[in-house]
Image (cartoon, rainbow, N blue to C red):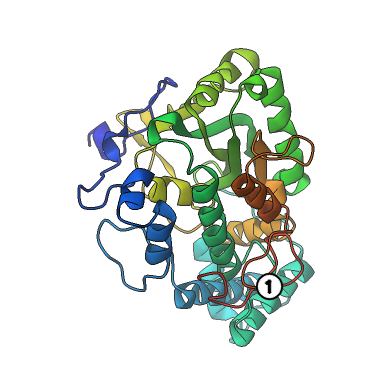
Amino acid sequence: MTPTKFPCLPATSAEVSPKRLKRSKERPHDPAHYKHLGGTCRDQFDANAAATMITPGVERFETEQEAAREDRLRARQARRVLNQPGLTNWINWNDRQWLSRQCPRHLKRPLLDHEALGSLAERLEAGNTSGFSPTTLASSMRMRLIRQDLSRALLDGFEGYADDELRTVTVIYSGWAYTPDTLDAVTAEQIKGQFRQHLNRAGVTRVPGPLFAVLHGEFEPTSGVYQLHYHVVTTAAKAAALMKLLATIAGYKATATGAAPVRRSRVGDRLRQFTYLAKGYWPGKPVVEIDGKPKRVRKHGRIPEPFGAQVLLWLDRQSFADLVVMTDCWSPRNGGIEAMRALYLFVQGRGKRNGSAGPSGAAGGRLGGADG
């Protein structure tokens, strides 16, 4: 087996070439191009988001039906994970056999709050029945609405910047690696505060220009570790300043598989790169040994249970505002452009679209309510 089958990220933090961003000549993503056609990059996003068929080369959100089906699956698997107390009998035999096959034998099962997991399953099921997305980040229906409105707000907020003035960045800190025993002891708000401190100490916040980051995570089933990280969009100058994290903060170092702690990419496809910032799920990505070296498999799958249930419970306890870090975008003290103000208010849960509350609001949006 050759190591090229599972390529790892570069060990250095050098800027990544956009060669993997396959821009079609018939579908360029320069905002000036859409203005020439009488539209904007945002108009193209709206068309793609409303698509119900998969078109090669076109970014598409999951449909309402796909998101609802995912929530039904999450609720069903939560019920199967809950089916643990008591003696095994013919009623629970299949569920217990399924759960035994799911959980890797070398990993210790996490201790779950069964009452909270049962409540989450009920809310996911109720959302499917009513057609209203549950107010939880553990819901695919809810995250679909959040991601669509967030993508629109990001496209509007950064429209004044040319592609070569922007960068997307992935930031990985070794201190954000948690085991099933330690994940529940940390909150997104705490990680957000820590990341802000890192940005201040490295001098990143002193560089002019907006920075918008969203917390994400993935599970490595071989070691049983959750690795949290940030997806960032910012200016080229501020992205370059992020490199100072490596010299300023201990813990920003290449991972065991060679992943760079700060990985920058040029912006060449806004629809694809901006919608990537916020994800509706955490993937499972195993590490395999190839030619004696650990390599992270690029293809991801579902997190095995009961670890997937632990992730859903953790997300259920967070607010979307706590997942987001914003600097120099807009603030009540310093102001800013109207599009950035709309982005700020949306993240804080006070922005409204088509009558539905923002991501931190108390009311769930009906399916399709944020597509217009």
Relative vertical location of residue 203 with respect to residue 96 in this rendering, above or below: above
Look at the image and tell me whether residue 295 can be seen: no
Relative vertical location of residue 131 with respect to residue 43 in this rendering, above or below: below
Considering the numbered disc 1 on the image, is that residue within a helix, a strand or a loop?
A: loop
Determine the image quadrant of residue 200. Answer: top right
Front residue of this view, candidates 200 and 346 = 346
Crowding at label 1, few (<14), some or many (≥20) Cα neighbours within 10 Å? Answer: many
Residue 134 place in picture, x, y as percent: 67, 73
* Amino acid type, mark 1: Gly
The residue tagged 1 is 364
Q: Is residue 279 left or right of residue 301?
A: right
Relative vertical location of residue 270 with respect to residue 251 in this rendering, above or below: below
Q: Is residue 259 left or right of residue 186?
A: left
Residue 170 place in picture, x, y as percent: 50, 35
Residue 239 place in picture, x, y as percent: 51, 26
Residue 104 place in picture, x, y as percent: 52, 54
Q: Is residue 349 left or right of residue 8?
A: right
Front residue of this view, candidates 173 and 99 = 173
Front residue of this view, candidates 237 and 367 = 237
Q: Residue at x 68, y 24 (%)?
A: 198
Look at the image and tell me whether residue 275 can be seen: yes
Q: Residue at x 44, y 72 (%)?
A: 63
Q: Residue at x 28, y 38 (%)?
A: 20
Q: Residue at x 69, y 79 (%)?
A: 122
Front residue of this view, candidates 268 and 338 = 338
Circle count: 1
- Which image quarter is the N terminus in? top left
Determine the image quadrant of residue 350. Answer: bottom right
Relative vertical location of residue 98 with respect to residue 244 in this rendering, above or below: below
Q: Is residue 196 left or right of residue 340?
A: right
